[in-house]
Image: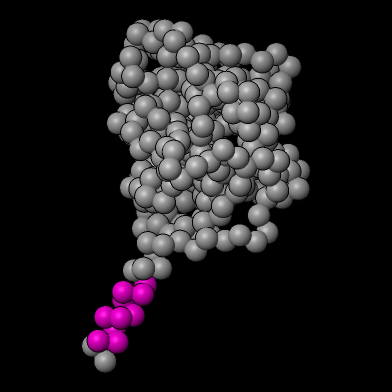
Amino acid sequence: MKALNVLLLCCILYACSNPKVEQVNLPAVASGTLVRLDSFPSKWVQARHVDIWLPATYNPKQQCRVLYMHDGQMLFDAATTWNKQEWGVDEVLGQLMAAEKIHPCIVVGVWNNSPARHAEYFPQKPFESLRQTYRDSLLHTARRNPSTALFSTEIQSDHYLKFLTEELKPYIDQHYATFPDRSHTFIAGSSMGGLISMYAICEYPDIFGGAACLSTHWPGTFEAENNPIPTAFCNYLANHLPDPATHKFYFDYGTATLDSLYEPFQLQVDSVMLRKGYEASHWVTRKFEGEDHSERAWRKRLDVPILFLLGKE
């Protein structure tokens, strides 16, 4: 009986460390190959799908750069997304690689856990710097809409980053031909995904060498006036920005729908970047007039941050 229990434990540990590779019902891609890790297990956060895009030129004997992207279910195929929009990652990166404008790159699309998305993507240290009464009001009374709470759980972004850096990245580096070092590892997302990308490179500067933060949701909530959150983010950046000689930041924003809130906050962030020594070779902020807060808009300009992070000299 004891031997049977040991065998059962070994099987459980093996299953947890070896996610099931799922190859059915995958998003359709225009180029390259998509591999799904079904319900990737974690001791830090709830299990979730991870979609890995391998470029058409992928060769197991040739190392690639790696781009980790949040909201992985929105990246590849509009037919499978809730709003019938997508980032077009396979089209954009495939075309840039075919034109030899960027280095070969694997994309790791990490699905969000929809109910806990805000809690996983809201940077934890800036949140904890807010007054306790304000934090409590966010967690317990802030609403996304009249029927939906903004946060479904306590803030989990530190746990989410541990999942990325301690569990997912080691798996990717072990199973695929990657350059595992900082200078070849990048992270990207939009809206709340832009916030967690910013936070990731600041918290793990030895792992991520560049971050693309599109339509970064600096308000943190849906209120712009009398909102202390953007100041908390600026203070955090002032104290935690990594070395500008070895890291790259890309920020952008549109001017329509939710993006119309962002410009004054982005300008405050830009002032911090300047004070901390960031120059054009390692930091870009772009304004896209008339563009809204949507995957359709991000797809139209995805080539800009990709060229900035992965472009050939």
The answer to whether residue 258 shows anywhere in this view is no
For residue 10, side relative to residue 233 (left or right) = left
Residue 223: percent from left, percent from top? 58, 28
For residue 44, side relative to residue 189 (left or right) = left
Tell me if residue 311 comes above or below residue 201 in the rendering: above
Instruction: Find out whether residue 1 is within the magenta segment.
Output: no
Kindly identify the residue that appears in the image at 50 percent across and 27 percent down: 103
Front-most of residues 251 and 299: 299
Snapshot quadrant of residue 262? top right
Tell me which segment is drawn in magenta.
3-12
Kindly identify the residue that appears in the image at 61 percent across and 60 percent down: 23
Kindly identify the residue that appears in the image at 42 percent across and 7 percent down: 279
Residue 27: percent from left, percent from top? 68, 50
Kindly identify the residue that appears in the image at 29 percent across and 87 percent down: 4
Position of the N terminus, as image quadrant, is bottom left
Residue 16: percent from left, percent from top? 39, 64
Q: Residue furthest left?
A: 2
For residue 46, side relative to residue 286 (left or right) = left
Magenta part mainly helix, strand or loop?
A: helix
The type of colouring in the image is one colour
The answer to whether residue 253 shows anywhere in this view is yes
Tell me if residue 267 comes above or below residue 98 in the rendering: above
For residue 148, side relative to residue 248 (left or right) = right
